[in-house]
């Protein structure tokens, strides 16, 4: 996977990060940017099924990573899928959208980040759980440089026989999957028995 050159993440190599709310053509989707607007590298993150782009974990991860002083700069972008945006508007929980809608939202987010980043040289996508899974499903035909999944839902909890790894066996996009040792959706030790592409 093309490396994100993070240098040394010490206090004297960090900078204050600016968080900005941006709008997509679809009014139900918004993008939040952490880090410089004119960065050469960008990472877009999508949320998991139950919490949106403003979840404590994604906020922390995005802000801290955006503080890294990289050559050319790094911006982190977060967005809500349509169902999550609607849930926030109505203050009522909603189930995730169909995969086709989630994939379309990803496509819009990628297009908008590229439009707003004229100096962009490398683009990475990924996300937490479901967000990372959908990113992995569109990565190969999205022209991105890499994939970052933070806790991948390899199978439903307690149902290891129902693997969601078919497309991962033929993935061509360089990928980093960060998985917990006791993740109920598939632990790292379990992965030794799965057929995964060499780029992971």
Image: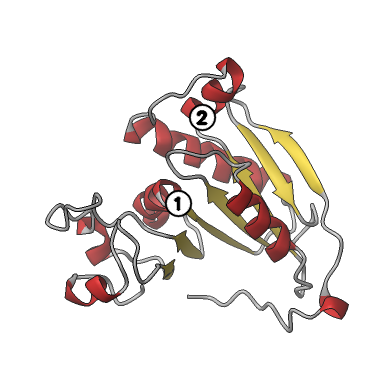
Quarter where residue 165 is shown = bottom left
Horizontally, residue 161 falls left or right of residue 92, namely: left
Residue at image position (37%, 51%) is: 133
Earlier in the chain: of badge 1 and badge 2, it is 2
Residue at image position (79%, 80%) is: 10
Residue at image position (44%, 34%) is: 104
Residue 40 visible in the current orientation: no
Q: x, y percentage for residue 132? A: 43, 53
Give the secondary structure at mark 2. Answer: helix
| Residue 154 versus residue 85 in the image, above or below | below
Q: x, y percentage for residue 17? A: 82, 57
Mark 2 Cα-neighbour bin, 10 Å: few <14, some 14–19, many ≥20: many
Horizontally, residue 162 falls left or right of residue 142, namely: left
Specify the label residue 84 is tagged with: 2
Q: Nearer the viewer, residue 45 or 24?
A: 45
Whole-angstrom CA distance, mark 1 to mark 2, is: 23 Å
């Amino acid at each position: 996977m093309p490396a994100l050159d993070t240098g040394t993440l010490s206090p004297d190599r960090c900078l204050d990060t600016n968080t900005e709310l941006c709008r997509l053509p679809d009014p139900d989707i918004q993008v939040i940017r952490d880090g410089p607007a004119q960065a050469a590298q960008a990472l877009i993150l999508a949320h998991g099924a139950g919490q949106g782009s403003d979840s404590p974990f994604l906020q922390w991860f995005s802000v801290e990573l955006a503080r890294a002083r990289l050559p050319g700069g790094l911006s982190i972008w977060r967005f809500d899928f349509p169902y999550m945006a609607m849930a926030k508007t109505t203050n009522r929980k909603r189930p995730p959208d169909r995969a086709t809608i989630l994939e379309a939202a990803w496509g819009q987010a990628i297009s908008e980040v590229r439009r707003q980043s004229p100096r962009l040289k490398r683009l990475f996508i990924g996300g937490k759980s479901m967000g990372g899974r959908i990113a992995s499903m569109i990565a190969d035909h999205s022209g991105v440089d890499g994939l970052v999944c933070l806790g991948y839902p390899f199978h439903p909890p307690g149902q290891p026989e129902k693997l969601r790894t078919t497309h991962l066996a033929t993935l061509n996009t360089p990928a980093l999957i960060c998985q917990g040792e006791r993740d109920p959706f598939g632990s790292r030790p379990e992965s030794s028995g799965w057929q995964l592409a060499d780029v992971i």
